[in-house]
Image: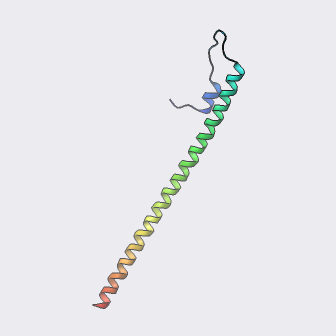
Amino acid sequence: MKITALDIRQKTFEKAFRGVDKDEVQAFLNMVSQQWERLGDENRELRLKLEHAQHDVQKMREVESSLYRTLKTAEDTGNSITE
C-alpha cells in the first residue's frame, strides 16, 4: 500500500475510553507527513541524479570505445608502415 503525505495528514482515529490527546496525535501526524514528503522529494532528486550519472557513464563508455578504436587504428597503421 502506497502512503502519501496527504494520507498521513488526513488519517483519523476512533475515540476510545481515556483516549489520546487529539492535538498531540494531529501534531505527530503533521510532523510525520512533512518528513514523508521531504523523503519523497529527496528520493525523486536522488533518482534523477542517478539517471544523470548513468547517462554520463554511458557517454564515457562511448568515448572510451572510440579512443580504443583510434588507438588500435594508430597501432595498425604504425605496424603497416614499419613492415
Which residue is at the front of the view, 18 or 23? 18
**Does residue 8 appear to the left or right of 59 in the view shown?**
right
Question: Residue at position x 56%, y 48% from top?
Answer: 46
How many labels were placed on the picture?
0
Residue 45 vertical placement versus 18 (above, below): below
* Image quadrant where residue 20 sits: top right
Dividing the image into 4 quarters, which one contains the C terminus? bottom left
Report whether 7 appears left or right of 79: right
Question: x, y (%) of residue 67?
Answer: 42, 73
Rendered position, 24 above or below 58: above
Q: Relative to the observer, which residue lies in front, 37 or 22?
A: 22
Image x and y of residue 18, in percent: 67, 10
Above or below 62: residue 46: above
The foreground one among 80 and 35 is: 35
* Residue found farthest to the left: 83
* Residue at horizontal 51 percent and vertical 53 percent from the top: 51
* Coloration of the structure image: rainbow
User: Which residue is drawn at the image coordinates 59% and 40% (left, top)?
Assistant: 40
- Identified at 63% across, 36% down, the residue is 35
Residue at the limit of the structure toward the top, as seen here: 17
Image coordinates of residue 44 in percent, x first then y, are 57, 45
Which residue of the protein is positioned furthest toward the bottom in this rendering? 82
